[in-house]
Every structure is written in structure tokens, then in C-alpha cells.
Amino acid sequence: MLSGIITSILLVLFLAGWAWAWSPRRRADFDAAAQLPLDDAETADGTRTVENKP
């Protein structure tokens, strides 16, 4: 009985997280996060470093 309740709670939490991640309102945030590895690096003091690319 207890394991069924815990499983149900975890299933509801999983579905809520899935719905949050796939929400259209989150798309812009995830698109921006996807571009972070491609952006220039920024140091702690706010200056940007540019890598030399051949």
C-alpha cells in the first residue's frame, strides 16, 4: 500500500516536471541556455575573452 502511494506521488512529480520543461513559456530560456557553450567566455569581473579561432 505504501509503495503504491509513493509510486503515485513520484509519477505525479515526474509528470509535473515534464510539463514544466516542455512548457512553451520555457522555450526561450532553454534556447538561451543551449547557446551558452557557443558564446564567448565571460570572466568574473564582467570582461569577455575571445578565443583565437583559425
Image: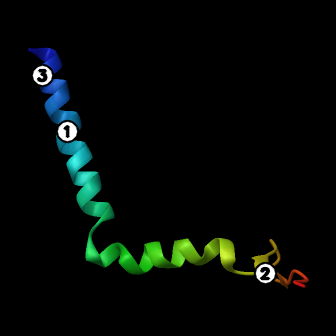
In the displayed structure, would residue 18 be above or below residue 54?
above
- CA distance for labels 2 and 3: 51 Å
| Amino acid identity at mark 1 | Leu
Of callouts 3 and 1, the N-terminal one: 3
Quarter of the image where the C terminus is located: bottom right
Residue under label 1, please give it: 11
Q: Which residue: 76% across, 81% down?
A: 40
Of callouts 2 and 3, the N-terminal one: 3
Quarter of the image where the N terminus is located: top left
In the displayed structure, would residue 32 be above or below residue 22?
below
Residue 7, position in %: x, y?
Answer: 18, 28
How crowded pointer 2 is (Cα within 10 Å; few <14, some 14-19, many 20+) is rated as: few
Residue 4: give its label.
3
Whether label 3 touches label 1, CB < 8 Å: no
Looking at the rendered structure, the secondary structure element under dot 1 is helix
Q: Which residue: 26% across, 45% down?
A: 14
In the displayed structure, does residue 11 sit left or right of residue 30? left
Q: Looking at this rendering, what residue extends furthest in the left direction?
A: 1
Of callouts 1 and 2, the N-terminal one: 1
| Amino acid identity at mark 2 | Gly
In the displayed structure, does residue 38 sit left or right of residue 40? left
Residue 26, position in %: x, y?
Answer: 35, 73
- CA distance for labels 3 and 1: 10 Å
| Amino acid identity at mark 3 | Gly
Q: Which residue: 23% across, 44% down?
A: 13
- CA distance for labels 1 and 2: 42 Å
Residue under label 2, please give it: 46
- Residue 47, image quadrant: bottom right
In the displayed structure, would residue 26 be above or below residue 47?
above
Looking at the rendered structure, the secondary structure element under dot 3 is helix
How crowded pointer 3 is (Cα within 10 Å; few <14, some 14-19, many 20+) is rated as: few
- Residue 38, image quadrant: bottom right
